[in-house]
């Protein structure tokens, strides 16, 4: 047998799973549902070890040996032989949301469960295992023990804290109106120690190991089930005069109709589209960690293929294969299913930003635009006008080629109108200053306003043909506009507007470029070809050669490796399940019927062509159906009772880990990208605000100081599936300006200023001195050689007089302050009632009697004279011991 022993982070509570290894093809798992203490689990393992030795008392052959240490179970999978267990053996912290850590899987281990004595071998097992392991779990798979990554922050902070009628059956005593699954601020019973929390089912669409956990979902306790998402997660710290603001970007890739670029296009028969990714940007003040007391804001947008039945034939080996519509759909059946899903999850309005080409010599991308317009027009006939789908077509490629038009300015106008319609989520009400000084843009903001803050209703859905390069730039511009509103709502800027070339926007741009590169590698096989700088037309000349290389890399990946990757994804997501006597995965001519269920069996119920939405969705619009209180949503929630001293709900212990030895070098919040360290210029005398527009000579490499530090930052941030480009190239592509010559000069100046220069030739003295000695204007920000003005001298004289009125003046200061300068000076007389209250002497503080007694008791305890404990002390200590060790 295998024994799987799991513990909480503090290692005070344990659970044990027993896995039977005598079954050749079935999975037999026994969970006794008992929670063990550390002492109990040691005794249990000791008895098992003793009972399984060959001879009693023989120490040489241990009956129980440790096979592997892991951080979680990904799932169980079977091909043609027995089951394997997939374990996470290495992890890395990538982000932190309200004290809840988000980890990236760094390494996994697959262990075959059945014993060798009962193993039934199959010749094709090894090939299936190799295909399954082609899905690299160490690239961009994320999980969290305490935060639901499959749902948005808005869902987690609203639905999981809403009052539930189901709690009335749990207790008849008084309750609070809201509960929080995350903290010890939930439903407390009077006089007792019970705390109730609410747990929600994950959103299956974004969970990638859902099918791998199906075999054990009903057999084990839910604490064993760890749901992982695929996509991107990045976090950076925006330092606003020392105040830490965390900017987090989470991208969730859909596990439905998942695949590679040319092999997965359009939508399947259930309305799931290819390359569908939900991107959420979360902004919060890290100085307050609690979800209930802190300030949190988020904004969600979506990308996905055009929701029609279309494909591209890659057998012709053309860079741009022709687009063909596979199925006539006059009633927009597939699009209706897709937009119905979106209305349920996001509410209204659904805004489509279509970036495909409108004018072409030969009809190519325009085929999709025409069909999508017809589908949206048909579906809008039956929706109420206030909840209609909004369609915005914009040929981004045409505007990019035009020398007269600025692409990003036009995108900024679109972004403003979109954010005003959808609003965004923030968990605190509008600040009083916005009521006193109302902003015109803020008053026009949409969304749903509640007493506790604002909610986002509706979503922007962006698409081009591939949903990679153009889409990422459009999403960045919308995200930048939403970021300004988020910062304004938290009271961090005075107007909801952000400029390019500020530290805040450059930090956000780097996050979005990492996000775009990662998603592009997953779907297209290469990094982004066109970046934000390309559309700003400030990209350095070296960028063009890199664009060509990325295009070739994408073409090679699509032509030669995408088919193998598609097979791996189909096997990992259990879209294809190997069965004895049926064709193998590599023998199938196509995977079309695997993703389109209606090819295998006809549905008994046909959806209405006019009432194409799910029952109940329209009634709650503009709010999303998934977030309203109704019987169907209540069934997705489960109530759990905690003891108020449990570590599971102690967010302080969970975040700070007082029982672990921590090192500053390994602390995540110190290693993450920081706007002050990585983006702010190092010159003295500049404005440290991250919202100040920097000059071209203050940006780029010179901002980042040492080149090696920048390379390390890039290596830490990159989480792409394949190897990143050389660090030097990445540093060039991440710079905000195209003036590479200025960057090099500035970098040289910094290095010369910080390192001693050895003079070897007298002829170069003048040149070296010119480089090293700088004017006081450059160093201190003010030219000291100018003669002070009369006003400045008067101000200084007043300052001197202020000092004279506070203490006995010396003779030198009297001589300096001539009568000419003191004509207009007011003599200041101290009016304080304290005799010694000035800048040099203060009154000593006075301690009250209780504080003095506590201090004396502390001194006596240090000498060994302990005071007798009271009854309250004994009760508190007994409660602590009971909760900690029993």
Image (tube, rainbow, N blue to C red):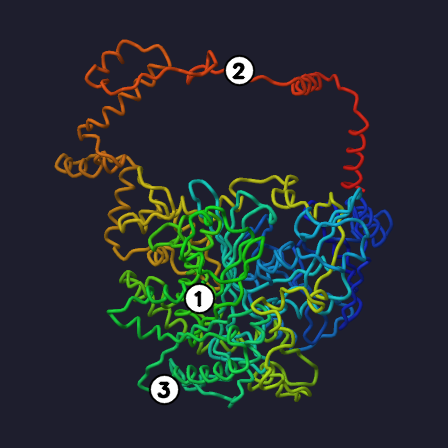
Residue 497 on image: x %, y %: 38, 54
The residue that mark 1 highlights is: 418
Q: Which mark is first along the chain, 3 or 1? A: 3
Mark pair 2, 3: CA separation: 86 Å
Front-lying residue, 195 or 216 = 195
Residue 722 on image: x %, y %: 47, 64
Judge whether 51 appears above or below 652 on screen: below
The residue that mark 3 highlights is: 363
Say whether marks 2 and 3 touch (CB < 8 Å): no
Question: What is the quadrant of residue 418 in the picture?
Answer: bottom left
Could you tell me which secondary element the residue under label 1 belongs to? helix
Q: Nearer the viewer, mark 2 or mark 3?
A: 2
Visible in this render: residue 139? no
Judge whether 731 appears above or below 348 on screen: above
Mark 3 is surrounded, within 10 Å at the Cα level, by few (under 14), some (14 to 19) or many (20 or more) other residues, namely: few
Name the residue at 76% across, 57% down: 167
Quadrant location of the N terminus?
bottom right
Q: Which mark is first along the chain, 3 or 2? A: 3
Mark pair 1, 3: CA separation: 29 Å
Q: Give the total of numbered labels.
A: 3
Mark pair 1, 2: CA separation: 60 Å
Would you say 393 lies left or right of 403 here? right
Front-lying residue, 226 or 139 = 226
Q: Nearer the viewer, mark 1 or mark 2?
A: 1
Residue 583 on image: x %, y %: 64, 85
Mark carried by residue 844? 2
Residue 733 on image: x %, y %: 34, 59
Name the residue at 36% across, 86% down: 363
Q: Nearer the viewer, mark 1 or mark 3?
A: 1
Would you say 524 lies left or right of 703 here? right
Mark 1 is surrounded, within 10 Å at the Cα level, by few (under 14), some (14 to 19) or many (20 or more) other residues, namely: many
């Amino acid at each position: 047998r295998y024994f799987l022993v799991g513990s909480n982070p503090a290692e005070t509570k344990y659970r044990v799973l027993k896995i039977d290894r005598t079954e050749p093809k079935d999975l037999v798992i026994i969970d006794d549902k008992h929670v063990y203490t550390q002492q109990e689990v040691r005794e249990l393992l000791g008895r098992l070890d003793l009972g399984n030795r060959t001879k009693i008392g023989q120490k040489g052959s241990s009956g129980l040996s440790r096979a592997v240490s892991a951080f979680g179970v990904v799932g169980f999978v079977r091909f043609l032989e027995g089951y394997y267990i997939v374990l996470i053996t290495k992890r890395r912290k990538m982000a932190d949301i309200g004290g809840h850590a988000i980890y990236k899987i760094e390494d996994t281990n697959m262990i075959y469960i059945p014993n060798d004595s009962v193993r039934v071998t199959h010749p094709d097992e090894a090939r299936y295992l190799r295909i399954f392991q082609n899905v690299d779990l160490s690239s961009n798979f994320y999980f969290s023990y305490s935060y639901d990554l499959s749902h948005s922050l808005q869902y987690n902070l609203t639905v999981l804290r809403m009052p539930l009628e189901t709690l009335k059956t749990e207790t008849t005593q008084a309750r609070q109106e809201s509960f929080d699954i995350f903290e010890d601020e939930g439903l407390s019973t009077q006089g007792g120690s019970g705390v109730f929390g609410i747990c929600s089912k994950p959103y299956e669409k974004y969970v990638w190991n859902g099918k791998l956990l199906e075999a054990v979902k009903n057999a084990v306790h839910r604490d064993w089930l760890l749901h992982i998402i695929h996509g991107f997660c990045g976090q950076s710290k925006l330092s606003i005069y020392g105040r830490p603001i965390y900017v987090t970007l989470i991208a969730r890739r859909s596990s439905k109709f998942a695949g590679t670029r040319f092999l997965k296009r359009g939508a399947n028969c259930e309305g799931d589209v290819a390359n569908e990714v939900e991107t959420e940007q979360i902004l919060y003040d890290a100085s307050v960690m609690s979800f209930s007391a802190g300030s949190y804001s988020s904004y969600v947008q979506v990308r996905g293929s055009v929701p029609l039945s279309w494909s591209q034939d890659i057998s012709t080996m053309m860079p741009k294969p022709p687009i063909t519509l596979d199925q006539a759909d006059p009633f927009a059946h597939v699009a209706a299913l897709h937009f119905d899903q979106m209305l349920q999850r996001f509410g209204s309005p659904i805004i489509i930003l279509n970036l495909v080409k409108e004018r072409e010599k030969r009809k190519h991308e325009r085929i999709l635009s025409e069909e999508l317009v017809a589908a949206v027009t048909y579906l809008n006939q039956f929706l109420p006008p206030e909840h209609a789908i909004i369609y915005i077509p914009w040929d981004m490629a045409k505007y990019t080629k035009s020398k007269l038009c600025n692409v990003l300015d036009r995108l900024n106008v679109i972004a403003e109108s979109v954010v005003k319609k959808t609003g965004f989520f923030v968990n605190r009400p509008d600040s009083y200053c916005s009521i006193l000084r109302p902003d015109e843009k803020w008053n026009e903001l949409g969304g749903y306003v509640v007493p506790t803050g604002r909610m986002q209703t509706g979503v922007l859905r962006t698409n081009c043909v591939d949903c990679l390069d153009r889409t990422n730039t459009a999403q960045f511009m919308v995200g930048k506009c939403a970021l300004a509103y988020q910062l304004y709502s938290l009271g961090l800027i005075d107007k909801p507007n952000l400029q390019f070339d500020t530290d805040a926007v450059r930090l956000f741009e780097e996050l979005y470029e990492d996000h775009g590169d990662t998603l592009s590698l997953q779907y297209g096989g290469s990094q982004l070809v066109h970046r934000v700088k390309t559309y700003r037309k400030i990209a350095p000349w070296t960028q063009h050669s890199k664009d060509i290389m990325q295009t070739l890399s994408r073409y090679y990946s699509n032509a030669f490796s995408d088919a193998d990757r598609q097979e791996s994804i189909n096997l990992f997501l259990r879209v294809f399940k190997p069965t004895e006597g049926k064709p193998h995965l590599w023998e199938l001519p196509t995977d079309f019927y695997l993703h389109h269920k209606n090819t295998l069996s006809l549905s008994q119920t046909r959806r209405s062509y006019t009432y194409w939405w799910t029952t109940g969705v329209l009634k709650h619009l503009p709010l999303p159906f998934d977030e309203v209180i109704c019987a169907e949503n209540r069934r997705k929630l489960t109530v759990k009772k905690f003891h108020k001293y449990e570590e599971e709900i102690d967010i302080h212990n969970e975040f700070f880990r007082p029982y672990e030895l921590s090192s500053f070098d390994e602390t995540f919040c110190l290693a993450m990208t920081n706007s002050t360290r990585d983006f702010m210029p190092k010159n003295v005398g500049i404005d440290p605000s991250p919202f100040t527009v920097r000059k071209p000579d203050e940006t780029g490499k010179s901002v980042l100081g040492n080149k090696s530090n920048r390379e390390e930052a890039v290596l830490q941030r990159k989480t792409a599936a394949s190897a990143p480009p050389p660090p030097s190239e990445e540093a060039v592509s991440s710079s905000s300006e195209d003036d590479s010559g200025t960057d090099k000069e500035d970098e040289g100046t910094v290095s010369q200023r910080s390192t001693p220069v050895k003079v070897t030739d007298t002829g170069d003295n003048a040149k070296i001195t010119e480089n090293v000695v700088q004017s006081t204007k450059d160093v201190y920000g003010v030219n000291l050689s100018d003669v002070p003005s009369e006003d400045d001298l008067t101000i200084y004289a007043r300052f001197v007089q202020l000092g004279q009125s506070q203490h006995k003046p010396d003779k030198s200061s009297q001589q300096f302050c001539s009568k000419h300068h003191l004509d207009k000076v007011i003599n200041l007389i101290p009016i304080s009632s304290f005799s010694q209250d000035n800048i040099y002497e203060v009154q000593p503080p006075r301690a009250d009697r209780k504080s003095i007694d506590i201090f004396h008791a502390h001194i006596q305890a240090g000498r060994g004279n302990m005071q007798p404990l009271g009854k309250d002390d004994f009760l508190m200590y007994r409660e602590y011991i009971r909760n900690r060790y029993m």
